[in-house]
Image (cartoon, grey):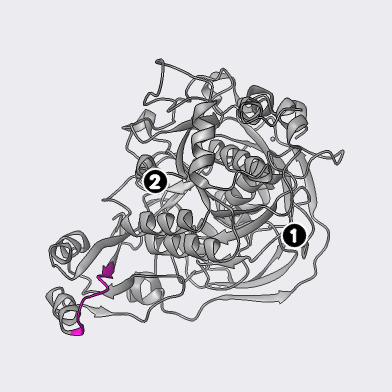
Amino acid sequence: MHVFNRPRRMTSAAVIAFLGAWTAIGYGQLQTAPISKAMVQETALPAIDRGLRDQDPPRAARTAADADRVRGAGGDTLPYLRGSLIVKFREDATRGAVTAATAQVAGTIADRTSWADFDIVDIPDPLDPEAAAAALRARPEVEYAQPRYRNHAMARPNDPLYGNQWNFPAIDMERAWDIQPGASPAVIVAVLDSGMAFFSGTVRYNSRLPFRLTQNGPLYPALGQVEVPFAAAPELGPSGSPRFVSPRDFIWNDDLPVDLDGHGTHVAGTVGQLTNNNNGVAGMAYNVRLMPVKVIQGLWDEIFGSPFDGTDDVVARGIRYAADNGARVINLSIGREEGGPATVVTDAIRYAVGRGVFVVAASGNTRADGNAANRLAQPAPDIAGFVAVGAVGRTLDIAFYSTTGSYVELSAPGGDQRQGGTSAGILQQTLDSDLLETYLRPVSQYGPPRADAFAYEYFQGTSMATPHVSGFAALLMQQGINNPAAIEAAMKQFATDKGTAGRDDLYGFGLINPRATLRGLGLAR
């Protein structure tokens, strides 16, 4: 999985090529090594505020090429993991039929993981996972089968103060807040992403292997055992606050979904940044509680050897977990363009909507690079209560990167730095990239990251548009509109029409209009 759209400060060909022991043991074996993450202490120094970053140069939207990673010296850039499949057998399938099906692909069923109604079937590495999945789909006892496609995040870095947040006046939020001021803690919004800056303390990791950022770039040494300081983002709330609900990390398989990337923290800020506190910036639904669910592997997670990647099955488990633990809204500023349908994720989204959860996903950031659809968002038109969101810039025209298509249902501010520079992005507090991304420094200056320093940075991408809709849904829920399908219908009915009259592939039903929706539903005051 990747995020939409937070390109790192690398070239579009940026990749990781682990060397030495990596080459010797292979990626699959490395994943089974002892997990190298341990909490050292739950206390830490106060978070460091590094201020507004409005002078950072704009960065281009992430393309599919940016998500390619070389897993070994040989250069594996496949969009899925080798050696396993996601398979759901029909409920009436006999044991014998299941055995015959797995035998067809020389497979074995792994132990069932938590929050899953599907199985992971291990297959020999030389087998083509797409061909193996197709063979299983043809069998009557199989409901669906697919490779374990990797997903990525959909956002990007950029900055403080409400006056810099053009995105909220653009959708008339000031008058919407007059009607519904920020929802309440009764509404829980789950942010499924790279983690969240919700915890203050120290975590020990182990960087065992040297690596290169590019195939021919300099060799960065293994750091060995390091202790990384973390702090809760001041504009989200203090560590240990009841504001943070049921945190869960599906990348490290623990309850500490700390953010080593910055994307998830930025997204969470647009949903629910603390507001009217004479500090920093504002958020859409600033009184809600936040559920940090980590389903995306950041670059540091990979360097530290996290046991899981952000594959479809991991995302599906995260969705089911959020639905089972009280989330009312799920934000998916993540996805992938490669491979076939994300059936296991679609199934999980249907499960969540069936439990009364409104689900929002980014449409993707590939319009300027082939316009490939985000596979996670594509089923949105077929599921009432699940919407796919495109992005507009400061001019309220479609952003240059925002993926278009028949599945796009709504639009929201995501920024367009080609049309106005850095400050035309979406501003929120997030981890300070200068102290976090030390792998972008010369080798002599490379060292462990710091995740206890924050800055107000501008990001752009459909990742940034999506949490506007999640926060909007929370406002409607606070007014008693609880049915996910009814929330979607209201948003579409009162959206500001853009582009061709009626629904179109660029803007969907239009730009979200929270005040018009609240008034149109008889909630004016």
Residue beneath label 2, please?
383
Please give the name of the residue rendered at 46% of the width and 56% of the height, measured from the top-left corner.
354
Question: Front-most of 516 and 363?
Answer: 516
Tell which circle, 2 or 1, labels the residue nearer the N-terminal end: 1
In this image, 134 relative to 473: left or right? left
Viewer can see residue 441: no
Give coordinates of residue 274: x percent, y percent. Answer: 77, 45
At label 1, which amino acid type do we have? Ala
**How many residues crowd around disc 2 within 10 Å: few (fewer than 14), some, or many (20 or more)?**
some
In this image, 148 relative to 412: left or right? left
Please give the name of the residue rendered at 44% of the width and 30% of the height, measured from the top-left corner.
401
For the residue labelled by badge 2, is the local secondary structure a helix, a strand or a loop? loop
Give coordinates of residue 437: x percent, y percent. Answer: 60, 51
Compared with 250, 191 (above or below) is above
Question: Front-most of 331 and 474?
Answer: 474
Does the magenta portion include 87?
yes
In this image, 494 relative to 97: left or right? right
Residue that sits furthest to the right in the current view: 278
Residue beneath label 1, please?
231
Viewer can see residue 487: yes
| Disc nearest the viewer among 2 and 1 | 2
Q: Which residues are magenta?
A: 85-95
For the residue labelled by badge 1, is the local secondary structure a helix, a strand or a loop? loop
Does the magenta portion include 49?
no
Residue that sits furthest to the bottom in the current view: 96
Q: Quadrant of residue 429?
A: top right
Task: Look at the numbered discs 2 and 1 and tell me whether their residues touch, using CB distance below 8 Å.
Answer: no
Q: Quadrant of the C terminus?
A: top right
